[in-house]
Image (cartoon, rainbow, N blue to C red):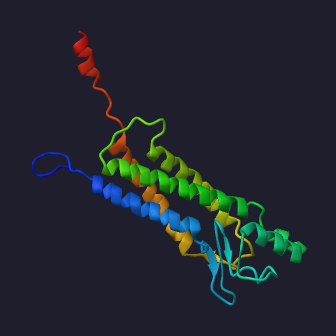
């Protein structure tokens, strides 16, 4: 039961706020990480929503970092057959995932602030709704991003950036629902209102 010993409901407000902050932190980390898919050897290379690290040498460029779109274009320029092992959807899905992770994190932080300050505002769209929509859409874009990673089988594998996203997304979905209960405006008591009219 979710009741205290005196029969009053337990207040999970601080738990929800803490979990929302943790989920937002994981989503922000995942958004800027360049290690969603990676390979440690023989060349240390990693890809994230914003770009890749250590991939310039493979693409025949100077330096270590570049955007995902530039990497795909450079590899295709070096090897015309690389179109079979690279996808045009990879870079756009990375940027979409990046944006959706940040929007979701901001929605969670705004909802956590409202819950912490015990505010129940009637907003045009609730921060928890923004967070949930962002997370649901990011589940699609993140999966497409990872599925269309460049290279053949075994070129790169899942790394810590993707795991941070996965934990942050699941935690964010659960926490947004907890926060929605704490921040939604109180519904009017219709029975009481009808009794006053009678």
Residue 40 percent across, percent down from the top left: 63, 86
Q: Is residue 84 left or right of residue 160?
A: right
State the residue in front, 109 or 135: 109
For this orientation, the residue located farthest to the bottom is 42
Q: Is residue 11 left or right of residue 34?
A: left
Residue 138 percent across, percent down from the top left: 58, 55
Q: Is residue 67 left or right of residue 25?
A: right
Q: Quadrant of the C terminus?
A: top left
Q: Is residue 33 above or below residue 17?
A: below
Residue 194, quarter of picture: top left
Q: How many marks?
A: 0
Residue 48 percent across, percent down from the top left: 63, 70
For this orientation, the residue located farthest to the top is 198
Q: Is residue 39 above or below residue 137?
A: below
Q: Residue at x 47, y 66 (%)?
A: 26
State the residue in front, 30 or 160: 30
For this orientation, the residue located farthest to the left is 6
Q: Residue at x 78, y 69 (%)?
A: 70
Report whether residue 167 is seen: no
Report whether residue 102 is seen: yes
Q: Is residue 178 above or below residue 50?
A: above
Q: Is residue 141 left or right of residue 136?
A: right
State the residue in front, 63 or 139: 63
Residue 163 percent across, percent down from the top left: 52, 70
């Amino acid at each position: 039961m979710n009741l205290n010993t005196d029969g009053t409901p337990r207040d999970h407000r601080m738990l929800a706020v803490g979990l929302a902050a943790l989920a937002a932190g994981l989503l922000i980390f995942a958004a800027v990480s360049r290690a969603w898919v990676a390979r440690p050897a023989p060349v240390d290379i990693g890809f994230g929503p914003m770009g890749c690290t250590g991939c310039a040498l493979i693409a025949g460029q100077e330096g270590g970092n570049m955007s995902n779109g530039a990497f795909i274009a450079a590899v295709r320029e070096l090897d015309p057959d690389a179109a079979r092992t690279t996808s045009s959807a990879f870079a756009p899905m990375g940027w979409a995932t990046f944006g959706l992770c940040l929007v979701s994190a901001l929605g969670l932080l705004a909802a956590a602030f409202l819950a912490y300050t015990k505010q129940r505002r009637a907003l045009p769209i609730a921060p928890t709704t923004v967070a949930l929509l962002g997370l649901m859409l990011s589940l699609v874009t993140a999966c497409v991003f990872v599925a269309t990673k460049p290279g053949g089988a075994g070129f790169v594998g899942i790394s810590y950036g993707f795991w941070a996203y996965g934990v942050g997304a699941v935690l964010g979905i659960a926490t947004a629902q907890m926060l929605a209960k704490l921040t939604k405006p109180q519904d009017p008591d219709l029975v009481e209102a009808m009794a006053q009219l009678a």
